[in-house]
Image: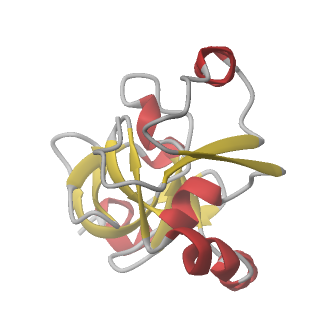
Amino acid sequence: PNLWQQPALRLAGSMEFQTGSRVRLHGLQHKAELNGESATCEAWDADLDAWEVQLASGRTVAVKPGNLALIRDAEDADASSLSWAVDMFGPELKTDGGLRKTIDVMAGKRAVLVYFCDKWCAPLTALADSYINYEGSGVEVVFVYSDSHPSP
């Protein structure tokens, strides 16, 4: 048999992926909202020439090896340094793309802006517009609603 076709030996650059490997998604064009998400390699799909990976949300997507980066133990340690974010905001944050793990949202951020508001607060459209149009990846804005009014 051709060993290069075996999932455990499939290479992307110099990194090896196998079933159970923890990976981070990057460079995705069509599903850019998934960039930065961590996932687990579930199975190799030879027809798609891609790994089926399971995201923290439980969703499974097919991703080419070139869009996966192996998560090393040091990166796992970095995730534990984000426990403050989980303590402050909880395990998940509501995003435009749905619920995401707080650690995944905060990974790699250099600054986190927290905007506290209540139903009587005027909308802060300048901040929202700036955040939406910001093209960098080092800043995250968390809107915290302190009343029982549903968040947008």
Please report the residue visible at 40 percent of the width from the left and 54 percent of the height from the top.
Answer: 147
Q: Is residue 136 above or below residue 65?
A: above
Q: Nearer the viewer, residue 131 or 97?
A: 131
Seen as rendered, the residue at the extreme front is 120
Indicate left or right for 18 with 51 as reference: right
The C terminus appears in which quarter of the rendering? top left
Seen as rendered, the residue at the extreme left is 47
Q: Is residue 147 above or below residue 43?
A: above
Indicate left or right for 65 with 83 as reference: left
**Residue 15 picture location, percent across and down:** 61, 63
Indicate left or right for 147 with 123 as reference: left
Q: Nearer the viewer, residue 125 or 87?
A: 125
Please report the residue visible at 67 percent of the width from the left and 43 percent of the height from the top.
Answer: 140
**Residue 136 picture location, percent across and down:** 75, 28
Q: How is the image coloured?
A: secondary structure
Please report the residue visible at 32 percent of the width from the left and 76 percent of the height from the top.
Answer: 19
How many numbered tags mark residues here? 0
Please report the residue visible at 24 percent of the width from the left and 49 percent of the height from the top.
Answer: 61
The N terminus appears in which quarter of the rendering? bottom left
**Residue 114 picture location, percent across and down:** 68, 50
Seen as rendered, the residue at the extreme right is 110
Q: Nearer the viewer, residue 130 or 103?
A: 130
**Residue 99 occupies quadrant:** bottom left
**Residue 145 picture location, percent across and down:** 47, 50
